[in-house]
Amino acid sequence: MAFSPALARLIDAFRVLPGVGAKSAQRMAFHLLQGERAGGAKLATALAEAVEHIQHCQRCRMFTESDYCEICRNERRDATRVCVVESPADVMALEQNTDFRGHYFVLMGRLSPIDGIGPEELGLNILRARLADGPVEELILAVGATVEGEATAQYVAELAERYGASVTRIAQGVPVGGELEYVDAGTLSQAFSGRRPL
């Protein structure tokens, strides 16, 4: 069955979201049109406003509506400690679950030459300028343990060391409450090699 052009465009628009396939997109579109038209209009307005007004912070690349995000503008935060993360979602996770009160740098991805993602696409020129201007003393790497994440961590660590910043990496390994027998070999190996004194 062929949908009307407007409905087909709506379904196709939902498919840009991660994890949303044809069936899920169709269900979302039908839901909005069947009983949530006011909610759909509100969603459309909010999305249009976000696309028009939200940009990247000039210092850390987090999402913001002004030149600098709230974290970068906060003078009570420790500017000597910068945590490098892959996405804005990582910033939110750290803010909600840790007591870290330094600054961030958001890569918006990870190095992946096969996908055409190099240092420029990750904004590493901005990080380089930030390291050169100081006062970054510690750069904390909080990137994934994927092959691309490891390559990104190595590249950023070398960059930071050139400017005299110490480099640390968040611990990775066995989750809290995890049983060793159920942990995969790579995670267990990483946890064992990264052990620290009590």
Image: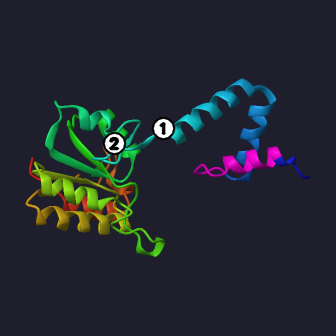
Residue matched to label 2: 91
Q: Which amino acid does label 2 sit on?
A: Val
Q: What residue lies at 55% left-to-right and 35% top-to-bottom?
A: 49
Q: Would you say the magenta stretch is mainly helix, strand or loop?
A: helix
Q: What residue lies at 13% left-to-right and 53% top-to-bottom?
A: 133
Front residue (pair 3, 59) = 59
The range drawn in magenta is 6-20
Residue matched to label 1: 53
Q: Hey, which quadrant is residue 65 in on the image? A: top left
- Looking at the picture, how far across and down is residue 120, in whole percent? 35, 65
**Dot label at residue 44:** none
The local crowd at label 1, few if under 14, some if 14 to 19, many if 20 or more residues have their Cα within 10 Å, is few
Res. 169 in view: no
Q: What residue lies at 31% left-to-right and 47% top-to-bottom?
A: 58
- Looking at the picture, how far across and down is residue 56, in whole percent? 39, 46
Element marked by disc 1 = helix
State left or right for residue 157 relative to residue 122: left
Q: Hey, which quadrant is residue 57 in on the image? A: top left
